[in-house]
Amino acid sequence: MSRRFHQLDVFSAVPLKGNPLAVVHAADGLDDATMAAFARWTNLSETTFLLPPTEPGADYRVRIFTPVAELPFAGHPTLGSCWAWLAAGGVPRDAGGVVQQCGVGLVRIRRDGTRLAFAAPPRRRTGALDEVLLATIARGLGVARSELLRHEWVDNGPGWCAVMLRSGAAVRALQPDWAALGELKVGVVAPQTDGEDTAFEVRAFFGGGGFEDPVTGSLNASLAQWLIGAGLAPDRYVAAQGHALGRAGRVHVQREGEAIWVGGDVVACITGEVVL
């Protein structure tokens, strides 16, 4: 059966500079095995499948697959899936925003000027990392334990833990030892030096898969909850991610009341149909 298909670049207004996402529209009727097989075939960090909602109040439902597993939530698939749903003629129930149904429940999305932004879901795990884990992370990142200035569990579904280095330059210089990282999913953040056009530099390492994610919405969402909540970041800032991979991702963060909104641009790279 032929289905509408988009391949998008998220967290960038310029094609090939963000994080790619494959989106299959009208995916009802596809079984789990087919979805997983197509995600392996695209070989992108995530592939999503748009479905009718099953929860009251949701505008659409999305399932999010990596090449190896299904995720309950991820940031760039949320923004990209919403963009694709709107581009295909989706009309939200509420003119004030879109409500996405996914594995973590309902996620609010709004238009933020030319961008889309999602409300960061609550973290499932918080608190400091223990010293055994910090020693493993330091080995995996190839730095001394003393260079990990701050640390926190920032898990909102994927399992993120995070550490802070001294500078954006130090983050960009990291050369991870994938074997040493083991199965950890580690986010690294640091404040930029003067003269940079962003407030923070971010990198995201998936130890189990042995790869770096270009631009990561879920990590930036939970980092923002940690950094703003701890007084380490202002209520509004922009983070850079993807430099080491030749990307120029920009993640726009804003706190409004109790909500933290994580936004970015989306641009279409491929539009067509896929036979599944």
Image (spheres, rainbow, N blue to C red):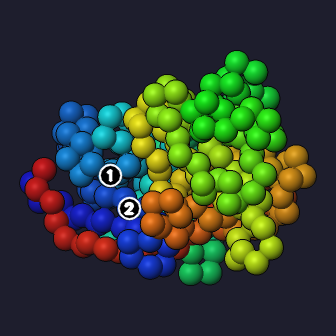
Residue 195's x, y, as percent?
A: 76, 78
Residue 196's x, y, as percent?
A: 72, 74
Q: In which quarter of the image is residue 97?
A: bottom right
Using residue 90 as the reference point, say whether residue 226 is left or right of it: right
Q: Which mark is residue 34?
A: none
Q: In which quarter of the image is residue 26?
A: bottom left
How many residues crowd mark 2 within 10 Å: few (<14), some (14–19), many (20+)?
many
Using residue 191 as the reference point, say whether residue 246 is left or right of it: left
Of the image marks 2 and 1, the number of the one nearer the N terminus: 2
Q: Which amino acid does label 1 sit on?
A: Leu
Could you tell me if the residues under marks 2 and 1 are in contact, i.e. CB atoms within 8 Å? yes
Q: Is residue 244 visible?
A: yes
Query: In the picture shown, does residue 55 fall above or below 9?
Result: above
Q: Residue at x 47, y 50 (%)?
A: 213
Q: Residue 20 carries which label?
A: 2
Q: Which amino acid does label 2 sit on?
A: Pro
| Cα–Cα span, label 2 and label 1 | 7 Å
Judging depth in this view, the residue of 127 and 135 nearest the camera is 135
Residue 168's x, y, as percent?
A: 70, 60
Which residue position is annotated with label 1? Answer: 44
Q: Residue at x 20, y 39 (%)?
A: 37
